[in-house]
Image: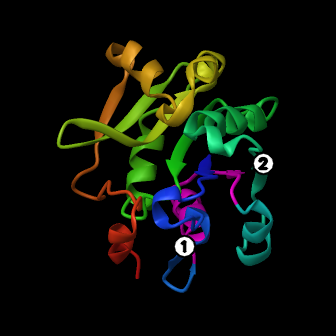
Amino acid sequence: MLLAAGGGRRLEGRPKALLEHRGRPLVEHAVRVLREGGCGPVHVVLGAAADDVRKRADLTGCVLADNPRWEEGMGSSLRAGLASLAGSGAHAALVLLVDQPGIGAAAVARVREAGGSATSLVAASYEGKRGHPVLFGADRWADIAATAVGDRGARSYLKAHQEAITLVECSDIAEEYDIDTVEDLFHLE
């Protein structure tokens, strides 16, 4: 699942999904990373400028979920994404954020391979610190959705269940920087 609903309020209102990366919208890059990492079908949560994202980005084959409450923060996008997975038969959801282009397919594959059961709780780590992507087994989705509020996403759930998390070191294959401000745009090519 790709969370790509943010409006980029610290990016002068430029929706993160539409930031250009290697000549295409950043959302396309993230979808490719998920697919190359072995994930599918890819569910993409859209919010800010959703119509423009649909027009400008090639999201062929993706399941698109709209988050009309995207301004409430990442928690509402996580809830929308988990709702889009309901009834899909998926045993787990790997969650990637659109604004982290330093995380590639190798990190996605490593986290995916460490989990996949309905009770899994797996997270990439960077020098021992928990980060993204994160994999949630389906048995955990309802509880995660119930605690996903504001810009914290699943942070409170993960903190409450930290003893159950399998950490997968990814600092050797990925960089977990975010594109949050205009100063961060140098990361995009």
| Residue at the image point whose x is 78% and y is 52% from the top | 63
Image spot of residue 32 (x, y percent): 57, 66
* Residue carrying label 2: 66
**Magenta run includes residue 189:** no
Measured Cα–Cα span from mark 1 to mark 2: 19 Å
Q: Which mark is residue 19?
A: 1
Question: Which corner quadrant of the image does residue 85 belong to?
Answer: top right
Please, which residue is most extreme toward the bottom here? Answer: 23
Q: Quadrant of the C terminus?
A: bottom left
Kindly give the residue lying farthest to the left in the view shown. Answer: 127
Q: Nearer the viewer, residue 2 or 152?
A: 152
Query: Which of the labelled discs sits on residue 172, or is there none?
Result: none
Tell me: residue 172, above or below residue 65: below
| Disc 2 element | strand
The mark nearer the N terminus, 1 or 2, is 1
- Using residue 32 as the reference point, say whether residue 60 is left or right of it: right
